[in-house]
């Protein structure tokens, strides 16, 4: 169901009627302004979100879209094309023209990792990397009653039986856990689950020893009902300053998952530049900064060439991880 | 206490009530229309709710979630075409009642059942959230596996004329449920390199195709084979078409029993309203008194299905409000609506935002009331549907099916799947393979597989570890007894009521 992010209205509770009126007025102005100069963008931009409405990626994409729409002076339409971990939206994008009117918002692992693991209709070279806004606070979690402070304590406890299970949710966590297990000299057995919320439920119910969660654990961790053993990224998570990264704990690995905006490959230079500017401005917009804080996302904003390099680094990192976890 | 009063006051604010009414109306319409269902309605509603206050947003979404369940019974009863998958069981007795000219009676039972189930679930949420949620947390993979095995026995209870064909259809449903990425290894299974099948066969394509489109093919065939008397087949306004105190006393035990079944099932994540209505119907049928003919137009059948599925929605919010964990799709969407406004549902939500919570509770109670009023008015209008000739209903419903399948994923692939399952459903009907048992297999398949595989890993494959799970053991015993009971029950002729 396509929906328009009004060009001007702030995210807060602006009365609907005035928002509609404002949007209508703006639309009228745009209609008048457009024929004069045929310069990109001259029509609404569509962002297909690779996940269902209401998820973190969707919420972030909608908020970013609003600021981008304001900067570019054209409405940005959000469409949810959920499925296969973002692969459906990504595949769809490869068949679209590289004119800057079609973008996809998805998690970075949809592109940096998934094509390395299975046969999909796209490769990382099929895209122009527009922007990354926000990093997921991926972590390993456990019940506080075990008394483990970090993942090292948990691994020491696992030594007793040689085996420990954890609620797993993605291919990333299975590779990471395999690498950790190898280093710690224990078996870490993944218990598959269907959602991040289920991971937290299984951990809180005491049915599994550990859990991997990309962010659903955060409110429980803040309330002290969940203990965070380690975060997976290169840096600590802003809201959890006491939790070490896997690298700090000596495992020598990391995993970074970003909210990524991509266009088809071969995007014209001037269009790419305008998009970069608009997304960079969105990334530093107070509404986006506060949203990242609320959603416990790390404040990570990158665009253009710098982002393309980051993506390539992630791809190489995962390739190594796949090799080492074999 | 003052927070409770303030919260209830917020719920009574005109804006909140307005959005409850709007949500209920939208939900009801979506529920009534076959092809469009709850996920589609919520997909439309979430972006709108971003621009509302937290309470209005939640009130709006709750109105939709609740009313779409209640509305789904309407077309199930009137034209044997469930508006929502969970209304599939409502057809079994609802449609025979409508054919016998008791459409209004059936619609009223469905409506009152929906409201009663909803209220019981809501009160369980308000009064017992914390203890019930703790209880639900104790249900791990081993216990859930046992529950899913129990759910499998419903196939035997609802198998229709032939147990063997019913089981075959159920097994086929389970097979269809295995399509998609393997949950442990992410290996594609039966996907034929179609990325669109990675998440499994789309639920909406299956349910809409199997239940709504195939029914339209069946009815079209009827119209073509005997065009003259197709219209006169339905008796309207029979003498016994009323719902008074006698009828209410007759179905009251079913209302209460099904409310409890629905609440219990709603509490456990992963089961949902469809399983609840199957379970409740199977139970009611099993304990039928002499003279009650389930499958031939028994009011209790309609009551069982509709009461249970409506108790599920509020009950599935229990883990959300008590622990901050979403137990259902609707609950996950409420989390989204709350977080967008800076409210993080979590274990401390009650301490941090008591006023908002009581406001939500108030809005839920108001939604039940609005549902009653809207349903009662809508009923009079919808009952006229039986007078609409099939030559108009069939093309309209067929179009809705096509639109609904497209709306869910914006893909023609899903539409093709829906049409395919429609044809398959028609063939199954022709050869007397139950579409209902197929649906049970398909709906419980993914959770059954997940729970069993989780349980095998956690227990390291040792059967003896069942001894540490007394609850699971008990449920398994019940399943065994139930299976024996269900298979021994003589199935009534045409028990399935797949209208012919």
Image: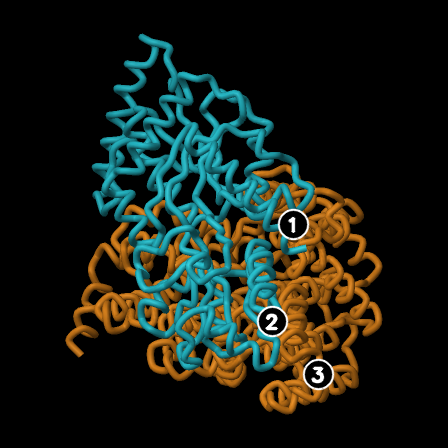
Chain colours: A cyan, B orange
Task: Determine the CA span between mark 3 and mark 2.
Answer: 20 Å
In this rendering, would B136 be left or right of B81?
Answer: left
In this rendering, would B375 be left or right of A172?
Answer: left
Place of residue A306 in the rendered image (x, y in percent of width and height, measured from the top left): 41, 32
Task: Determine the CA span between mark 2 and mark 1.
Answer: 19 Å
The 10 Å Cα crowd at callout 1, few under 14, some 14 to 19, many 20 or more, is few
Residue at the image position 56 percent from the left and 41 percent from the top: A316
Place of residue A305 in the rendered image (x, y in percent of width and height, measured from the top left): 43, 28
In this rendering, would B11 be left or right of B195?
Answer: left
Nearer the observer: mark 1 or 3; the answer is 1
Q: Residue pushed farthest left? A: B2
Chain letter of mark 1 equals A
Name the residue carrying label 2.
A186
Point out which mark residue A96 bears: none
Query: Can residue B66 be seen?
Result: no
- Could you tell me which secondary element the residue under label 1 belongs to? helix
- Could you tell me which secondary element the residue under label 2 belongs to? loop
Place of residue A222 in the rendered image (x, y in percent of width and height, measured from the top left): 31, 67
The 10 Å Cα crowd at callout 3, few under 14, some 14 to 19, many 20 or more, is few
Point out which mark residue A323 bears: 1
- The quarter of the picture where residue A225 lies is bottom left
Point out which mark residue B462 bears: 3
Task: Determine the CA span between mark 1 and mark 3.
Answer: 33 Å
Residue at the image position 17 percent from the left and 69 percent from the top: B6
- Could you tell me which secondary element the residue under label 3 belongs to? loop
**Labels 3 and 2 in the same subunit:** no
Query: Can residue A302 be seen?
Result: yes
Residue at the image position 67 percent from the left and 47 percent from the top: B197
Chain letter of mark 3 equals B
Looking at the image, which is closer to me, A265 or A89? A265
Q: Residue pushed farthest top? A: A36
Looking at the image, which is closer to me, B55 or B425? B55
């Amino acid at each position: 169901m396509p929906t328009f992010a009004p060009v001007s209205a702030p995210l807060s509770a602006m009365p609907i009627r005035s928002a509609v009126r404002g949007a209508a007025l703006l639309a009228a102005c745009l209609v008048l302004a457009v024929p004069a100069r045929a310069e990109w963008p001259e029509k609404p931009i569509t962002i297909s979100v690779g996940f269902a409405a209401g998820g973190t990626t969707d919420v972030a994409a909608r908020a970013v879209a609003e600021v981008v729409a304001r900067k570019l002076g054209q409405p940005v339409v959000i469409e949810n094309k959920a499925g296969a971990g973002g692969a459906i939206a990504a595949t769809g994008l490869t068949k679209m023209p590289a004119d800057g009117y079609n973008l996809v918002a998805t998690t970075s692992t949809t592109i940096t990792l998934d094509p390395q693991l299975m046969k999909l209709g796209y490769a990382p070279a099929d895209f122009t990397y527009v922007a990354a806004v926000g990093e997921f606070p991926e972590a390993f979690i456990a019940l506080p009653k075990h008394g483990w402070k970090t993942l090292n304590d948990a691994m020491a406890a696992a030594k007793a039986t040689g085996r420990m299970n954890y609620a797993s949710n993605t291919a990333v966590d299975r590779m990471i856990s395999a690498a950790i297990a190898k280093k710690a000299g224990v078996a870490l057995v993944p218990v598959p689950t269907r959602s991040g919320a289920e991971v937290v439920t299984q951990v809180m119910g005491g049915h599994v020893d550990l859990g991997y969660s990309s962010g659903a654990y955060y409110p429980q961790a803040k309330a002290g009902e969940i203990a965070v053993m380690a975060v997976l990224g290169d840096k600590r998570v802003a809201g959890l300053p006491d939790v070490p990264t896997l690298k700090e704990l000596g495992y020598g690995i990391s995993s970074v998952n970003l909210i990524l905006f991509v266009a088809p490959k071969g995007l014209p230079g001037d269009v790419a530049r305008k998009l970069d500017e608009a997304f960079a401005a969105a990334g530093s917009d107070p509404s986006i900064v506060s949203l990242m804080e609320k959603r416990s996302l790390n404040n990570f904003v990158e665009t253009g060439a710098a982002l393309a390099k980051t993506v390539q680094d992630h791809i190489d990192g995962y390739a190594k991880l796949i090799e080492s976890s074999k | 206490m003052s927070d409770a009063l303030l919260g209830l006051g917020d719920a009574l604010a005109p804006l909140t009530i307005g959005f409850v009414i709007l949500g209920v109306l939208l939900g009801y319409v979506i529920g009534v229309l076959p092809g469009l269902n709850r996920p589609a309605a919520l997909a439309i509603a979430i972006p709108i709710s971003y621009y509302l206050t937290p309470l209005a947003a939640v009130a709006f979404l709750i109105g939709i979630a609740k009313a779409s369940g209640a509305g789904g019974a309407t077309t199930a009863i009137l034209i044997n075409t469930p508006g929502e998958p969970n209304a599939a069981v409502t057809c079994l007795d609802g449609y025979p009642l409508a054919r016998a000219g008791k459409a209004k009676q059936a619609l009223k039972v469905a409506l009152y059942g929906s409201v009663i189930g909803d209220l019981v679930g809501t009160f369980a949420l308000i009064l017992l959230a914390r203890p019930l949620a703790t209880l639900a947390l104790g249900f791990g993979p081993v216990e859930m596996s046992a529950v899913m095995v129990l759910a499998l026995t419903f196939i035997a209870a609802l198998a229709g004329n032939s147990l063997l064909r019913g089981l075959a259809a159920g097994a086929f449903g389970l097979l269809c449920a295995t399509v998609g990425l393997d949950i442990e290894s992410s290996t594609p299974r039966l996907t034929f390199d179609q990325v669109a099948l990675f998440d499994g066969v789309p639920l909406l394509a299956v349910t809409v195709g199997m239940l709504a489109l195939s029914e339209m093919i069946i009815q079209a065939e009827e119209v073509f084979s005997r065009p003259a008397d197709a219209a006169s087949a339905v008796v309207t306004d029979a003498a016994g078409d009323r719902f008074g105190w006698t009828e209410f006393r007759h179905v009251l035990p079913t209302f209460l029993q099904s409310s409890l079944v629905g609440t219990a099932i709603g509490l456990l994540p992963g089961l949902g309203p469809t399983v609840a209505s199957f379970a409740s119907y199977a139970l009611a049928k099993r304990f039928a008194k002499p003279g009650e003919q389930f499958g031939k137009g028994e009011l209790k059948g309609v009551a069982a299905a509709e009461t249970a599925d409506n108790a599920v929605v509020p009950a599935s919010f229990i883990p959300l409000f008590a622990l901050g964990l979403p137990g259902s799709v609707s609950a996950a969407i409420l989390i989204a609506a709350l977080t967008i406004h800076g409210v993080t549902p979590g274990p401390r939500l009650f301490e941090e935002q008591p006023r908002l919570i009581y406001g939500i509770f108030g809005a839920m109670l108001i939604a039940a009331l609005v549902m009653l009023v809207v349903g009662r008015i809508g009923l009079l209008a919808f009952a006229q549907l039986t007078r609409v000739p099939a030559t108009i209903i069939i093309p309209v419903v067929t179009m809705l099916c096509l639109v609904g399948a497209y709306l869910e994923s914006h893909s023609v692939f899903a539409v093709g799947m829906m049409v395919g399952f429609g044809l398959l459903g028609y063939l199954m009907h022709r050869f007397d393979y139950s579409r209902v048992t197929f649906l049970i297999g398909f709906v419980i398949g993914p959770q059954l597989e997940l729970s069993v595989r989780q349980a095998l890993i956690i227990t390291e494959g040792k059967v003896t570890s069942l001894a540490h799970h007394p609850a699971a053991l008990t449920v398994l015993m019940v399943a065994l007894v139930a299976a024996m009971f269900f298979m021994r029950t003589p199935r009534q002729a045409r028990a399935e009521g797949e209208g012919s």
